[in-house]
Amino acid sequence: MAVDIKNLNHKQLNELISKAQIRQEDIRKESVSKLREKIQALVKAEGFSLEDIFGRGKARKSGGVVPPKYRNPADPAQTWSGRGKRPHWFNNALKAGKKEKDLLI
């Protein structure tokens, strides 16, 4: 099917491009699906599972809480783990002449 794009106006060209992009994505998805089926069949034919070959994937970190490392001497309720942006009280203490080791818990 040949489309003479020289005779299309702006709106028609945009519609053609949109339809072509949708079709391109559909073809890609079909190819990925077929390839996935081939890989699964090959792995199964060899007597393995996908987990045997590829593992279970990356384990996600829990994003757990990091214990505080520094404490504000003026307000002991304010702490900082030493990760991320420094809190204002920490910067102010350094400007006032304190050293990081002075603020350690």
Image (cartoon, rainbow, N blue to C red):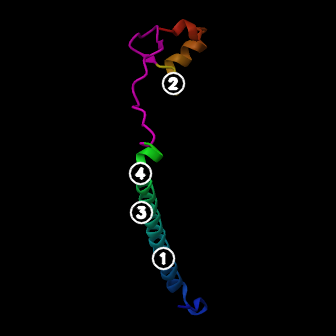
| Residue to which mark 2 is pinned | 83
Return the disc, 3 or 4, that comes first in the chain's sequence: 3
In-image side of 6 versus 59 (left or right): right
Q: Give the label, 2 or 3, closer to the camera.
A: 3
Regarding mark 3 in the picture, which secondary structure is present there? helix
Return the disc, 1 or 4, that comes first in the chain's sequence: 1
Return the disc, 4 or 2, that comes first in the chain's sequence: 4
Q: In which quarter of the image is residue 76?
A: top left
The residue nearer to you, when weighing 3 against 37, is 37
Q: What span is colored magenta in the figure?
A: 56-80
Residue 18, which numbered label?
A: 1
The residue nearer to you, when weighing 105 against 38, is 38
Q: What residue type is labelled 1?
A: Ser
The residue nearer to you, when weighing 59 against 63, is 59
Task: Measure the alpha-carbon separation of dots 4 and 2.
Answer: 47 Å
Task: Measure the alpha-carbon separation of dots 1 and 2.
Answer: 46 Å
